Amino acid sequence: MDVIHLVIALLFGLVVGSFLNVVIWRLPRGENLSKPRSRCPGCGALIRWYDNIPVVSWLLLRAKCRGCGSRIAGRYPFVELLTGVLFLLAWRKHGGHPVAALELFTTIQVCLFLAALVAISFIDIDHRIIPDRISKPGMVFFVALAPLSLLHMLEPQFVGGVKAALSAWLHAGAGAVVGAGVVLAIRAVGSWILKKEAMGLGDVKLLALIGAVVGPLQALYALALACLAGAVVGSLLFAIGKRRPMPCALTVKGDGTEASFDRMRVRGERLEVQGAPELAAGSEVTLDLVLPAARVLEEEDPRLALKARVAEVSGSGAARTWRLEVLEPTEDDEERLEMFGQSYRYIPFGPFLAMGGALSVLWGEEVHWFITVGYPEWARGMIGG
Ligand SMILES: [Zn+2]
């Protein structure tokens, strides 16, 4: 294999990863992906091209804005590097013969798929949503292009014919249906047992997308891997007990004070925000609240106008916490606050599904071996059978 091809794949992935950072930030906020150009959130200065080179600029700038010195999160180079490495692995796995058109088309599809998984994972971590704007068109796109993917060529002797195209569409379509179906089934059983939503509809569409790329069997493998990893990481996080407040846009007005917050917690009818300026307990305030999740989930207006009372103030400085009691909320307000509140109580499953999908598409044979031979043998050994 040519090293130069791998380097090109890596560099291409770094550039795509840089774009994914924009997607992860803007898509859930309903902003345009191509305009305007990126600005520093600290000082508002336009980011110049030489300060926007994937990974390199972050290192040269030592994670600080050239203008105002505010910190640039390590998340940005991480997403770039992750995408670069995934593209390199995709090329190594599928792009063995770059002159053969089918191999090239397969590699491009796998790269697009991996890029979608990266964007979905980080949006799900930040906002607890899997955006329809990626999963739905993605599903259609990958089913449509199935005849151009080696992942759907079950019988190599068919390659190129009408039969090959039909069987590829069938395989990809079956992957999407099985992916959606199995999550829907788990969801139904889970809601019945737990009496609350076990998995979101976003997960249904995500596994359908994964199935459209890797086919029905590997879609099931991806789900099994996701459950395994989710159980391990979930219990670790549960043990640590760390929960971050969820992002939103909240402006509180009252008593001549105005304060804005970009994160809050919801506990029943009480909202909790941190880092607030001084405001006496008992005073009444108005809330102007935008729940970003609602923007992508539904077409309804994401803006809520609420009245609240400051029920409790504790701590001081940046750690000062206000508890706001919402006064006379409408049924609709209550429902949406509850949805928002519930969404952060669970760890997002999207990143685990995405990881399963990535493993399937990059190491399909190894995954098959692990699920059918490796893991059962290990489990048998553990039981001592
Ligand atoms: Zn700046």
Image (cartoon, helix red, strand yellow):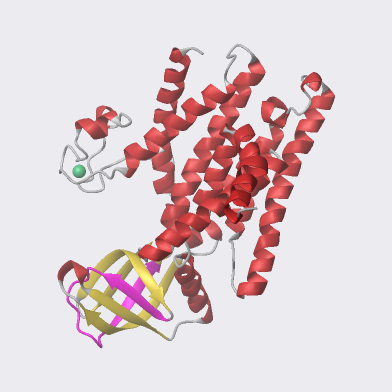
Quarter of the rendered structure image containing ligand 1: top left
> Residue at horizontal 42%, vertical 24%?
10
For residue 4, what is the image quadrant?
top left
Q: Does the magenta stretch include residue 286?
A: yes
> Where residue 308 appears, x then y in whole percent?
34, 82
Figure label count? 0
**Nearest the eye: 174 or 231:** 231
**Nearest the eye: 148 or 253:** 148
| Residue numbers of the magenta segment | 269-289
Q: Residue furthest front?
A: 384
Q: Is residue 181 visible?
A: yes
**Nearest the eye: 41 or 354:** 354
> Residue at horizontal 49%, vertical 78%?
334
> Residue at horizontal 22%, vertical 39%?
63
> Where residue 254 appears, x then y in whole percent?
25, 78
Q: Does the magenta stretch include residue 278?
A: yes
**Where 316 sits versus 367, above or below?**
below
> Where residue 284 appears, x then y in whole percent?
28, 84
